[in-house]
């Protein structure tokens, strides 16, 4: 069951986390997923965890296209399945750019409504809901206060966000933020969210992924090895290729080699 909350221009949608599609993560992401899963499960399961917990969630940082958002989704899904008999786990995803507004007070008001919405989920679910709250591209919201791009409204927004985080109980809600620009972040966030770094996949992992993708797309097509060689050449030409690059190049190479036709 999904819940929709409309505050005018912004809409918040929550999902039962167990309904998120299962995705096989790249091998180098699985140890990170395991850490996020075990920590979230511990916080949601332990009655002893209080609002004074040393952190309220995780800041997942790394280059564009490395699977940061999917990592959080799969963590939420695993936790929901693990707690299926005892609690409902909701997944709430927020595009930070939809909250950030240069108009004084607007973003702060949306923040207040968002966190109230999260708290209200417990009432809707008879106090039996846990929430995984994801802020994608969180640097859009929490610019470092020393940056020239920051304005007075950023200072106010940061203060409101940190106050709300400080009052969040991780026994009920774990907060995740993703960013590919940690250099833009307000360093005060590191006292609230534990930072984990996601790196680009090794070349051999990307080529293995491309090979499996070609198997599903082409079957026993004799041109598969030729296409895979083209994919490898294009990936090696990139400075730090990501899984997203690999997926795009795989499609383009198949079309270039005329193994996919309209």
Image: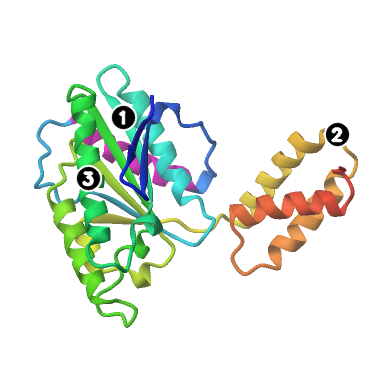
Front residue (pair 90, 38):
90
Q: Is residue 44 above or below residue 214?
A: above
Furthest-bottom residue in this view: 148
Q: Which residue is mark 1?
A: 89
Q: x, y percentage for residue 23?
A: 53, 35
Q: Residue at x 12, y 31 (%)?
A: 47
Please give left or right for residue 90 compared with residue 245 in the image: left
Q: Residue at x 34, y 62 (%)?
A: 100
Q: Main secondary structure of the magenta part?
A: helix
Front residue (pair 238, 13):
13
Q: Earlier in the sequence, mark 1 or mark 3?
A: 1
Q: x, y percentage for residue 128?
A: 21, 24
Q: Residue at x 22, y 63 (%)?
A: 105
Labels 1 & 3 near each other (Cβ < 8 A) = no
Looking at the rendered image, the quarter that the C terminus falls into is top right
Residue 104: quarter of image: bottom left
Which element type, helix, strand or loop, lies under badge 1?
A: strand
Residue 115 image label: 3
User: Magenta segment, which residues?
Assistant: 29-45
Q: Earlier in the sequence, mark 1 or mark 2?
A: 1
Q: CA distance from mark 1 to mark 2?
A: 42 Å
Q: Earlier in the sequence, mark 3 or mark 2?
A: 3
């Amino acid at each position: 069951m999904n819940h929709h909350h409309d505050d005018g221009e912004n809409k918040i949608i929550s999902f039962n986390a167990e309904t998120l599609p299962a995705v096989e993560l790249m091998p180098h992401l699985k140890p990170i997923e395991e850490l996020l899963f075990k920590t979230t499960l511990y916080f949601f399961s332990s009655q002893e965890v209080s609002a004074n917990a040393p952190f309220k969630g995780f800041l997942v940082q790394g280059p564009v296209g490395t699977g940061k958002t999917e990592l959080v989704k799969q963590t939420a899904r695993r936790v929901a399945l693990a707690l299926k008999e005892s609690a409902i786990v909701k997944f709430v995803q927020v595009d930070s750019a939809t909250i950030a507004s240069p108009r004084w007070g607007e973003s702060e008001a949306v923040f207040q409504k968002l966190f109230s919405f999260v708290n209200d989920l417990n009432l809707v679910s008879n106090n039996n809901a846990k929430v995984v709250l994801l802020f994608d591209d969180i640097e859009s919201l929490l610019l470092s206060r020393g940056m020239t791009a920051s304005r007075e409204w950023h200072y106010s927004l940061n203060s409101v966000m940190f106050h709300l985080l400080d009052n969040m109980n991780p026994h009920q809600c774990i907060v995740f933020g993703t960013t590919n620009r940690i250099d833009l972040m307000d360093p005060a966030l590191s006292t609230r969210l534990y930072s984990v770094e996601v790196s680009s996949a090794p070349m051999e992992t990307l080529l293995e992924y491309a090979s499996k993708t070609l198997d599903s797309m082409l079957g026993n097509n004799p041109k598969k090895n030729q296409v895979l060689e083209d994919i490898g050449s294009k990936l090696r030409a990139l400075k730090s290729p990501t899984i997203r690059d690999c997926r795009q190049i795989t499609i383009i190479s198949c079309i270039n080699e005329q193994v996919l036709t309209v």
